[in-house]
Every structure is written in C-alpha cells, then in structure tokens.
Amino acid sequence: MVPPYFSTEVATAIGVSLDTFYRTRQIRHERDGLPAPISERGPLKWERTGFDAWLTRHHPMRPKTITNDTFTPPPAASDEEHRERLRTAYGHHGA
C-alpha cells in the first residue's frame, strides 16, 4: 500500500507555502477541483493517485491549451489564403 500525501507535500507540489495552502484549501477545492483530503483528523492526508491525477489534469498553474490542436496557425494574410486553407483542410480542391 502506498502512503498518502501530507499537507506539506501537496503544498510543495502546488507551489505555495504550507500556511497559504491551509488558508486557501477550501477555495482551491471549490474553484480548482482539488480533491478533498481522506483524513480530516490530525494532519490532513490525500490519496496519492487521486491527487496525482488532479495535478496532471487540473493544476491551476498549468498553461491553458487549445482543444484538439497542438498549435495555433498564424492568421491568413488575405481572404484568398484563408479560403485556400479551408479547401485544403476540408478536401474541396476542385471547388
């Protein structure tokens, strides 16, 4: 069995001090979807796989990505260039 994360480890992973983490824990839970601790008595503890999954997907410091796209192409210089990109993307080469 894998031991749980303690508050100090969670605060370090998020990038805040332990004091800041304790003051903002409820807000982070509501706003950012931070998992709830598995223990409310004594030192707070978090289940490792749940916290690791949240950190991977929903960390508030993670840069936002464009859905279904790896990069944003530069804007077209003209309407004709834009139409050509649409024809290429949708396969209407003869239209």
Image (spheres, rainbow, N blue to C red):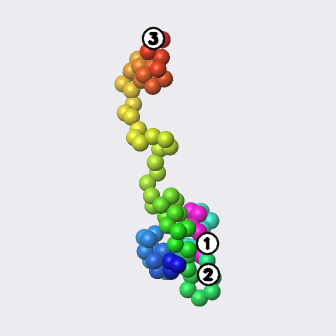
Q: Is residue 34 magenta?
A: yes
**Residue 66's x, y, as percent?**
47, 44
Q: Which residue is mark 1?
A: 36
Residue drawn at (45%, 58%), measured in percent from left and top? 62
Q: Residues within 10 Å of mark 2 (few under 14, many from 20)?
A: few
Query: Disc 2, disc 1: CB below 8 Å?
Result: no
Number of the label disc, if any, that sits on residue 11: none
Write down the region rendered in magenta: 32-37
The mark nearer the N terminus, 3 or 2, is 2
Query: Taking 35 as reference, is 94 left or right?
Result: left
Three-letter amino acid code of the residue under disc 3? Gly
**Residue 29's x, y, as percent?**
60, 68
Number of the label disc, if any, that sits on residue 94: 3
Q: Residues within 10 Å of mark 1 (few under 14, many from 20)?
A: some
Q: Is residue 24 magenta?
A: no
Three-letter amino acid code of the residue under disc 2? Ser
Query: Disc 1, disc 3: CB below 8 Å?
Result: no
SS at mark 2 in the image: loop
Q: Which numbered mark, 1 or 3, is in the foreground of this view? A: 3
65 lies above or below 60: above
Residue drawn at (61%, 81%), measured in percent from left and top? 39
C-alpha distance separating marks 1 and 3: 57 Å
Residue drawn at (45%, 40%), measured in percent from left and top? 69
Number of the label disc, if any, that sits on residue 39: 2
Q: Residues within 10 Å of mark 3 (few under 14, many from 20)?
A: few
Three-letter amino acid code of the residue under disc 1? Ala
SS at mark 3 in the image: loop
SS at mark 1 in the image: loop
